[in-house]
Amino acid sequence: MATTKQRGAARRNVKQAQKGARSKQTLKNLSSKPRSDLGKEANAVRRGDSPTRRELEAEVRRLNISGRSKMGKDELKRAVARAS
């Protein structure tokens, strides 16, 4: 059974973790233009107009392009376009 001191430390750790998680909610802190662009990209993926990151990674892997693990989604798109 945990002592009072241990329970207090655990409670502080949980509060600290929750505070950190709240501060890292970056989408809420973005200005309207980037947030809007992200929403448009997400809608394009949902509609099927744009590939998902996972689909792009599979395509890049199939094309055997090096450095793919360090690439972002836009870089993956450009790499697929260059290789095709």
Image: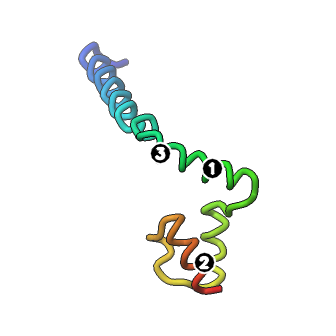
Between marks 2 and 3, how big is the CA–CA gap? 30 Å
* Percent x, y of residue 25: 42, 36
Label 1 crowding class (10 Å Cα cut-off): few <14, some 14-19, many 20+?
some
Q: Residue furthest right?
A: 47
Res 42 label: 1
Q: Tell me which residue sits at (44%, 34%) in the image.
A: 28
Applied colour scheme: rainbow
Residue at which label 2 appears: 60
Q: Check the picture and name the quadrant holding the N terminus.
A: top left
Q: Is mark 3 on a helix, strand or loop?
A: helix
Q: Is mark 2 on a helix, strand or loop?
A: helix
Q: Which of 43 and 66 is in front in this view?
A: 43
* Percent x, y of residue 22: 39, 30
Q: Tell me which residue sits at (27%, 13%) in the image.
A: 4
Residue type marked 1: Ala
Q: Is 6 situated above or below 64?
A: above
Q: Is 49 situated above or below 70?
A: above
- Whether residue 50 sits left or right of residue 11 in the image: it is right
Res 33 label: 3
Residue type marked 3: Lys
Label 3 crowding class (10 Å Cα cut-off): few <14, some 14-19, many 20+?
few
Q: Are marks 2 and 3 in contact (CB under 8 Å)?
A: no
Q: Which of marks 2 and 1 is in front?
A: 1
Residue type marked 2: Val
